[in-house]
Amino acid sequence: EIVLTQSPGTLSLSPGERATLSCRASQTVSSNYLAWYQQKPGQAPTLLIHGASSRATGIPDRFSGSGSGTDFTLTITRLEPEDFAVYYCQQYGNSYTFGQGTKLEIK
Amino acid sequence: QLRLQESGPGLVKASETLSLTCTVSGGSISSSNYYWGWIRQPPGKGLEWIASVYYTGSTYYNASLKSRVAISVDTAKNQFSLKLNSVGAADTAVYYCAGDSSGFHWGQGTLVIVSS
């Protein structure tokens, strides 16, 4: 099983700042099949990024994904108030596993 | 636009079987572009993939739950279903159904509480 480790556990930033979230895999993620999700309280997760770097339909361009192999990054430039949420990475190249999540909170 | 809706009991007694159904609308469950899956989230915790199924009936399971889980698809009804037997308190969670096409597209989720 591929284990995904996200860091930091909590990230405290202000609106307008840049957020950088990390996801590290215990093995190479096949074909960079790595997705990022945003989850707000009481809601289902929403797909942001697939294939490590492709934005899902309707996702603003302030969200970007990068990385390959075992190290992946989600970057949010110019944080908006609605961006404060929990973010999960997920690999779907070898079965499916999720990271434990990063909580992005308002500083 | 693809939409998924979970249905089933919100309360299940310990040691019994949890049964959920997901109804897909806005698209065909027989699409070759999608796998269909179940994911759960215990209160205040992270996400755990449970199982997935393809429209042909091919199934895939989380190894940690495989002995207790069955997933199936009904193409005539555009639905897929989950059964989890011998449930305990640790199975209390929000259960999501989702369509996987390079990432999951989620239903709204349904809370299932296991009571003793």
Image: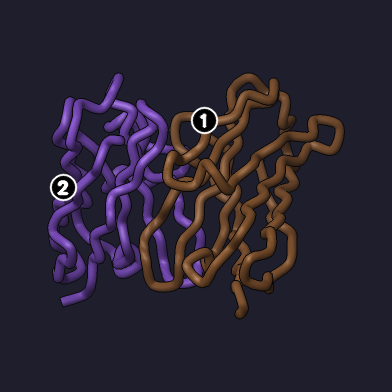
Chain colours: A purple, B brown
Q: Image point 42% across, 38% down: which residue?
A: A56
Q: Which residue is mark 2?
A: A22
Picture coordinates of residue A43 (x, y %)?
50, 65
Picture coordinates of residue A63 (x, y %)?
28, 46
Per the model, the C-alpha gap separating discs 1 and 2 is 23 Å
- Left or right of B69? Residue B62 is left
Q: Image point 67% across, 59% down: which residue?
A: B18
Vertical side of B80 occupied by A106: above or below? below
Q: Which residue is mark 1?
A: B101
Give the quarter of the figure containing the C terminus of chain A. bottom left
| Disc 1 residue type (three-letter) | Ser
Picture coordinates of residue A70 (x, y %)?
16, 32
Identify which residue, B102 or B74, lies in the foreground.
Answer: B74
Q: Image point 17% across, 51% down: which residue?
A: A21
- Left or right of B39? Residue A89 is left
Q: Image point 49% across, 47% down: which residue?
A: B65
